[in-house]
Image (tube, rainbow, N blue to C red):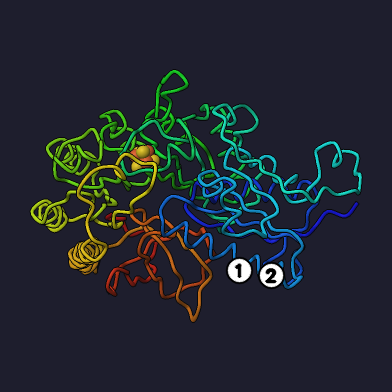
């Protein structure tokens, strides 16, 4: 029995990307040829959706509809929808895209081969050729699905360039931020053990990863459900001893759970990048309370000061929400002043998205869409001035970069420690010949808006960053 060829579209965040890579690994192991969508050779299309916000939902439905057209034109035979939107919407997604043949929730990614082939595990084992063309709904959430072998992200077919990889240390979230759909989609937090994480890191390094990005919905709470133990600080110290990896980057830290021990571990582990990604969402106390962030402005400022004092050269990235229900003009101005005065190295802004099923959906004072959009733009403009000034101030600095891609016309995209892949600005290195994953010392010669221009310098010069 020939296994069908599969084209795979992965939408959404790095956590969804890891699920996509795992499903691709399972399909490849089962013997399915993996082909690009553009090749015209796919028999089955899989769309791994994001359902976090209304905008991501719209994008996923649009991609599914395009895939459905391919099916109607006879260019693909089967369409599988997977991921967060399936987990969130269930079978009602069939009303939007009736051509879907199989629905696969986030907790059932292990059933991807069954969803793609339409055959039961017994049929697959015996390679029986009769197909079951009935629709499969495999997305019902059950809290114990992320246990044992089911939660392993090993044996992935990676979609990132080989020199960096995402390593998920936990799944789900126990926080109760009032605007967020994630806990209802991904369930409560389940952490991998340190041994599982080390084994996975070893596999990623053997596969060429020189930078490993630690991800989870809330990485600072790492270890809580498995008896805490040394927690995130201990995990960072253990990973720091691994040979082969050059940079370890921590993403998605939650402010109220950031301990002194974690700060010391980040400062003291030479492979851990001096980069803190800490979504703060707001700074006004009433807004923070309405969002149920369990942290005040005073506590936030004291944590940020501590991070800057104890981690020399740290780059701090945050994300904010503009236009949360009830946000007054004065509260928004407080947030804007804070952005201007603190000077984040990197910053993203989301306009509040009204998500059914969340506590914030039910509270009073939802703002008009135009007001939300105006506030997003005002915050981005404020940050733009901060970021441009920070980039200009780096001219003349000498620091280490990792080459991120092959060069074009002798110019190589690269990143320094304060820049994460996909979301942050870049350093463009002019001169020399390099490969993705190479580490080299450069001198910054110019700034172009958010990005830096640099040239290689002999490695005997000291690194000032
Ligand atoms: S920490 Fe808050 S915003 Fe982040 S996933 Fe958990 S509930 Fe959502």
Q: Position of residue 61 (x, y in %)?
A: 53, 61
Mark 1 and mark 2 in contact? Answer it, CB < 8 Å.
yes
Q: State how far apart marks 1 and 2 are (Cα).
A: 7 Å
Q: Is residue 270 visible?
A: no
The mark found on residue 70 in the picture is: 2
Q: Secondary structure at mark 1?
A: helix
**Residue drawn where x is 62% and y is 53% of the image:** 81
Q: Furthest-bottom residue in view? A: 409
Q: Is residue 58 visible?
A: yes
Residue count near mark 2 (Cα–Cα under 10 Å), binned few <14, some 14–19, many ≥20: some
* Image quarter of residue 287: top left
Q: Left or right of 354: which side holds 19?
A: right
Q: Secondary structure at mark 2?
A: helix
**Nearest the camera: 421 or 359?**
359
Q: Position of residue 201 (x, y in %)?
A: 55, 39
- Judge: label 2 CB < 8 Å from ligand 1: no
Q: Quadrant of the C terminus?
A: bottom left
Q: Furthest-front residue in view? A: 95
Q: Position of residue 89 (x, y in %)?
A: 52, 47
**Residue drawn where x is 32% and y is 32% of the image:** 262
**Residue drawn where x is 23% and y is 52% of the image:** 366
- Judge: label 1 CB < 8 Å from ligand 1: no
66 lies above or below 241: below
The residue to which callout 1 is attached is 66
């Amino acid at each position: 029995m020939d296994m069908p060829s599969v084209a795979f579209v992965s939408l959404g965040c790095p956590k969804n990307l890891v699920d996509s890579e795992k499903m691709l690994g399972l399909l490849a192991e089962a013997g399915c040829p993996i082909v690009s969508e553009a090749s015209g050779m796919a028999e089955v299309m899989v769309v791994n959706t994001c359902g976090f916000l209304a905008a991501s939902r719209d994008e996923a439905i649009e991609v599914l509809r395009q895939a459905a057209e391919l099916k109607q034109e006879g260019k693909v035979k089967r369409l599988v929808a997977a991921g967060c939107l399936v987990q969130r919407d269930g079978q009602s997604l069939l009303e939007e895209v009736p051509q879907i043949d199989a629905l696969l929730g986030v907790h059932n990614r292990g059933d991807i081969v069954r969803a793609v082939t339409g055959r039961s595990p017994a049929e697959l084992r015996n390679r029986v050729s009769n197909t079951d063309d009935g629709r499969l709904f495999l997305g019902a959430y059950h809290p114990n699905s992320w246990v044992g072998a089911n939660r392993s992200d090993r044996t992935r077919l990676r979609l990132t360039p080989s020199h960096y990889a995402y390593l998920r240390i936990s799944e789900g979230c126990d926080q109760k931020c009032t605007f967020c759909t994630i806990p209802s989609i991904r369930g409560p937090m389940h952490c991998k053990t340190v041994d599982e994480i080390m084994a996975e890191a070893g596999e990623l390094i053997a596969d060429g990863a020189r930078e490993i990005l630690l991800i989870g919905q809330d990485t600072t709470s790492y270890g809580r459900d498995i008896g805490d133990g040394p927690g995130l600080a201990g995990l960072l110290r253990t990973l720091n001893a691994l040979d082969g990896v050059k940079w370890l980057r921590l993403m998605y830290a939650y402010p109220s759970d950031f301990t002194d021990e974690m700060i010391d571990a980040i400062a003291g582990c030479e492979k851990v990048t001096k980069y803190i990604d800490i979504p703060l969402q707001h700074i006004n106390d009433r807004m923070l309370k309405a969002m149920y962030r369990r942290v005040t402005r005073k506590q936030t400022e004291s944590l940020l000061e501590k991070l800057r004092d104890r981690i020399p050269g740290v780059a701090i990235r945050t994300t904010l929400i503009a236009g949360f229900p009830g946000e007054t003009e004065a509260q928004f101005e407080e947030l804007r002043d804070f952005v201007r005065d603190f000077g984040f190295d990197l910053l993203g802004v989301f306009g509040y998205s009204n998500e059914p099923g969340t506590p914030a959906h039910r509270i009073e004072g939802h703002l008009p869409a135009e007001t939300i959009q105006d506030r997003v733009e005002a915050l981005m403009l404020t940050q733009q001035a901060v970021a441009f000034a920070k980039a200009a101030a780096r001219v003349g600095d000498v620091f280490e970069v990792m080459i991120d891609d092959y060069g074009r016309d002798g110019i190589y995209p690269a990143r320094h420690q304060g820049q994460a892949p996909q979301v942050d600005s870049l350093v463009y290195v002019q001169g020399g010949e390099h490969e993705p994953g190479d580490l080299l010392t450069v001198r910054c010669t110019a700034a172009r808006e958010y990005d830096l221009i640099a040239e290689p310098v002999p490695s005997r010069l000291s690194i000032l960053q």
